[in-house]
Amino acid sequence: MSTLDPRQRASALQLHGVLAHWAECADQPWLDPLLGWEETERARRSLERRLRCAHIGRFKPLADFDWAWPEQCDQRAIAELMSLDFLASATNAILIGSSGLGKTMIAQNIAHQAVLQGHTVLFATAGQLLGELASLDSDSTLRYRLRRYAAPDLLVIDEVGYLSYSNRHADLLFELINRRHEK
């Protein structure tokens, strides 16, 4: 339930028709449920949109992760990442380990948690991201795509060390990281 008064809630929802007729609506018994329905529906639609735009894909929940395998996983460090404190401090998080340890699954869980907390997220593989950027012909299209990748609150780049990349790919990755660093 909101701590705002009904008029502030209607204003935050930009219900201009209700606000224009506030004197007629203010004491109506339907006003509070209407505002609640609108707030709930907008929150639901926002969550669905952020989940869809994040491209996280299907993943195993962290609750189902077998912490006994692999033994190298630091459960406390992962729990700290799941708190999302690194977003507030604009700190980078890098998951390092050999293939099959669960880095992607952990990254997907962190991304999902960020979406649930109201953040914008984009999850992409390095090959997908760099391949798309390298294939662009015009500078204006490249700048637009770099802005798209730099915009989310959380950008997860998976499989960075999986393939070898050309100097062009390395330059593009540096440019993207530099743009996000400037934010």
Image (spheres, grey):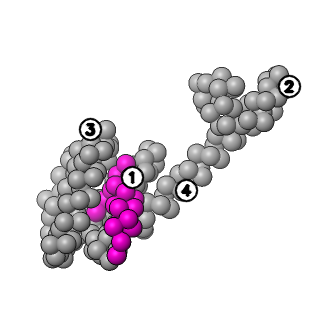
Amino acid identity at mark 4:
Glu
Amino acid identity at mark 2:
Glu
* C-alpha separation, residue under disc 4 versus residue under disc 2: 34 Å
Q: Which residue is mark 1?
A: 152
Tell me which residue sits at (28%, 51%) in the image. Answer: 180
Q: Which residue is mark 4?
A: 48
Give the secondary structure at mark 1. Answer: loop
* C-alpha separation, residue under disc 1 versus residue under disc 3: 15 Å
Q: Residues within 10 Å of mark 3 (few under 14, many from 20)?
A: few
Q: Residues within 10 Å of mark 2 (few under 14, many from 20)?
A: few
Quadrant containing the C terminus is top left
Which of marks 3 and 4 precedes in the sequence? 4
* C-alpha separation, residue under disc 1 versus residue under disc 4: 16 Å
Image location (x, y in percent) of residue 171: 19, 66
* C-alpha separation, residue under disc 1 versus residue under disc 2: 41 Å
Amino acid identity at mark 1:
Pro
Q: Which residues are magenta?
A: 137-157
Res 148 → quadrant: bottom left
Which of marks 4 and 1 precedes in the sequence? 4
Which of marks 3 and 2 precedes in the sequence? 2
Tell me which residue sits at (61%, 24%) in the image. Answer: 4
Image location (x, y in percent) of residue 141: 39, 67
Amino acid identity at mark 3:
Ser
Which of marks 2 and 4 precedes in the sequence? 2
Q: Residues within 10 Å of mark 4 (few under 14, many from 20)?
A: some
Q: Which residue is mark 3?
A: 89
Which of marks 3 and 1 precedes in the sequence? 3
Give the secondary structure at mark 2. Answer: helix
